[in-house]
Amino acid sequence: MSSEDYLKDISEIKNLMNKSTRFISLSGLSGILAGTFALVGAAYAYWLVTGSKRGYLILSGEIFNLVLLDMFLVLVLSVGTAIYLTTLKAKKNNEKIWDATTKRLLTSFLVPLVAGGIYTLIILKQQRYGQTGALMLLFYGLALVNASKYTLGYVKYLGYTEMILGLLCAVFPGFGFWFWVLGFGVMHIVYGTLMYFKYERK
């Protein structure tokens, strides 16, 4: 066996091991779109709040309900786009979209995310509004880092970035909205662009 054949066999074995232990069909384009949806949604929420009589958000009334609807639409569009594009990529690469690795990935991601969501709701119920942005960024970052062992490396770095932004947001709560925009909007676009050019662009 020549050294070239030997290296080729090693490469194939490595690819098979990656496919069996990592979910590698994540779409970079879905990250770009999720960040774009977040920026558009944030711009609309900012316009709603700053254009209101009070000029700030309170947890009641029509403005608050519209902001909640805005956030829900951003979430639905982001998740729906991610599922659709990731499924297309998996089919194109002849990879399974739902297997043991996917289940482990989702479990690792959802456990800290759901716990953080419940805790954030508790904080809101206690009328401690100033830290909600920081908590969202922190728990989302923890969820990404926790799930990163089952997917591509950039997810881990995105998670670390979200956690750092969450800590900064806790230190400067008056800028919570802008840290949220940076974390969920800009950083998703950066992450998605890196993923696209490294793994998807032919």
Image (cartoon, rainbow, N blue to C red):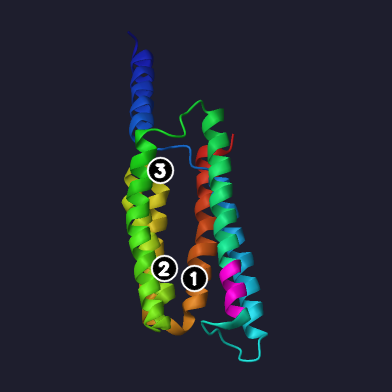
Q: Is residue 112 above or below residue 46?
A: above
- Kindly indicate whether the residue at mark 2 contacts the one at mark 1 (C-beta within 8 angstroms): yes
Disc 2 packing (10 Å; few <14; some 14–19; many ≥20): many
Q: Secondary structure at mark 1?
A: helix
In the rendered image, residue 36 lying in the magenta stretch gets the answer no
Task: Name the kind of residue labelled 2 in the image.
Answer: Met
Q: Nearer the viewer, mark 1 or mark 2?
A: 2
Earlier along the polypeptide chain: callout 3 or callout 2? 2
Q: Which mark is residue 136?
A: 2
* Residue marked by disc 3: 152
Task: Name the kind of residue labelled 3 in the image.
Answer: Leu
Residue 48 at least partly seen? yes
- The answer to whether residue 166 is left or right of residue 69 is left
Residue located at (58% from left, 38% from top): 201
* Residues rendered magenta in the picture: 63-69
Instruction: Find residue 140 and report its image quarter.
Output: bottom left
In the foreground, 164 or 62: 62
Q: Which mark is residue 180?
A: 1
